[in-house]
């Protein structure tokens, strides 16, 4: 038990490694952002809020659906119990690496395409990370690693918001969408645990795969609906808050 908890604590703390890196990479900008000339109406931002909540919920739900049950179900598809903790540590490191990689790519490619690509990578390899069919179970470990890399595209969502909405409400909308996504993912995890207690963990594998399919497809489809932002900067003055621009 002691070893298990050590692995748990290490796994949870690994993503914090990127925090100093992130702080160092934040540029110092003395420019003043032009304040909104009109009173901001949060209802103008219902579309970007809804889309960001859907995408955050999809990523969190898929991630929690697998990671929450991995220590329990991994042995059922051939992963040695002695290696589960190590695999989860590698998974957390891969997610952190994905944060950095997709953040770098966001300066080159359109953010919506990165979100769509990340969701498809995670979707394709989620079925390998938690393999229901015996012939593909030998791919469980590499599937888990690549799945984690795809999940690493999740921070692109708040970056997308920064390009599309008034600076005065960026923090609010990003915070609400992030916390709603985490809450929704937690509820999905609880629901899957309840279902697993009823149908058994052998059938839970298929249910987890189906859950990740639905959640990540929701991310992909929502990302695909985001249109290219116009050259207009009216959003800075609070005149526009539509992520479809």
Image: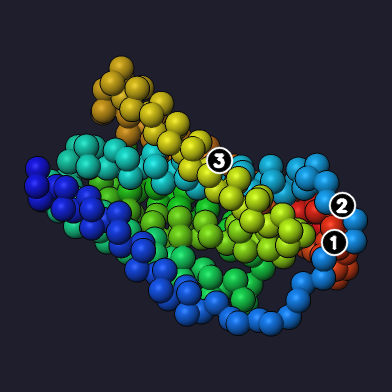
Near mark 2 (Cα within 10 A), the count class, few <14, some 14-19 or many ≥20, is: few
Q: Residue furthest top?
A: 198
Q: Which mark is residue 36?
A: 1
Could you tell me if residue 142 is visible in this image?
Answer: no
Q: Which mark is residue 180?
A: 3
Q: Secondary structure at mark 1?
A: loop
The image quadrant of residue 57 is: top right
Q: Which mark is residue 205?
A: none
Tag 2 near tag 1, CB within 8 Å: yes
Q: Residue at the location (34% across, 22% down)? A: 194
Where's the C terminus, which quadrant? Answer: bottom right
Between the C-alphas of marks 2 and 1, the distance is 7 Å
Near mark 1 (Cα within 10 A), the count class, few <14, some 14-19 or many ≥20, is: some
Between residues 32 and 222, which one lies in front from this camera angle? Answer: 32
Between the C-alphas of marks 1 and 3, the distance is 27 Å
Between the C-alphas of marks 2 and 3, the distance is 26 Å
| Colour pattern of the rendering | rainbow
Sequence-wise, the earlier of marks 1 and 3 is: 1
Side of 46 where 79 appears, left or right: left
Side of 149 where 27 appears, left or right: right
Q: Which residue is mark 2?
A: 39
Give percent across and percent down for residue 58.
53, 43
Q: Secondary structure at mark 2?
A: loop
Vertical position of residue 6 compared to residue 54: above or below: below
Near mark 3 (Cα within 10 A), the count class, few <14, some 14-19 or many ≥20, is: some
Could you tell me if residue 177 is visible in this image?
Answer: yes
Q: Secondary structure at mark 3?
A: helix
Sequence-wise, the earlier of marks 2 and 3 is: 2
Where's the N terminus, which quadrant? Answer: top left
């Amino acid at each position: 038990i002691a070893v298990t908890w050590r692995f748990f604590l290490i796994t949870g703390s690994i993503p914090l490694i990127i925090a100093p890196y992130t702080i160092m990479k934040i540029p110092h900008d003395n420019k003043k952002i032009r304040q909104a000339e009109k009173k901001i109406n949060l209802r103008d931002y219902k579309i970007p809020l809804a889309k960001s909540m859907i995408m955050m919920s999809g990523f969190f739900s898929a991630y929690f659906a697998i990671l929450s049950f991995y220590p329990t179900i991994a042995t059922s598809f051939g992963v040695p119990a002695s290696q589960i903790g190590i695999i989860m540590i590698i998974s957390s490191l891969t997610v952190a690496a994905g944060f950095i990689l997709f953040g770098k790519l966001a300066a080159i490619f359109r953010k919506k395409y990165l979100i769509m690509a990340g969701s498809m990578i995670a979707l394709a390899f989620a079925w390998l990370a938690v393999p229901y069919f015996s012939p593909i179970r030998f791919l469980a470990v590499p599937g888990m690693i690549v799945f984690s890399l795809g999940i690493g595209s999740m921070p692109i969502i708040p970056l997308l918001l920064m390009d599309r909405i008034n600076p005065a409400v960026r923090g609010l909308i990003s915070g609400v969408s992030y916390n709603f996504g985490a809450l929704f993912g937690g509820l999905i995890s609880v629901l899957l645990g309840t279902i697993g207690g009823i149908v058994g963990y052998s059938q839970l594998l298929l249910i987890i795969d189906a859950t990740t399919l639905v959640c990540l497809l929701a991310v992909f489809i929502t990302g695909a609906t985001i249109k290219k932002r116009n050259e207009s900067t009216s959003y800075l003055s609070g005149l526009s808050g539509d992520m479809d621009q």
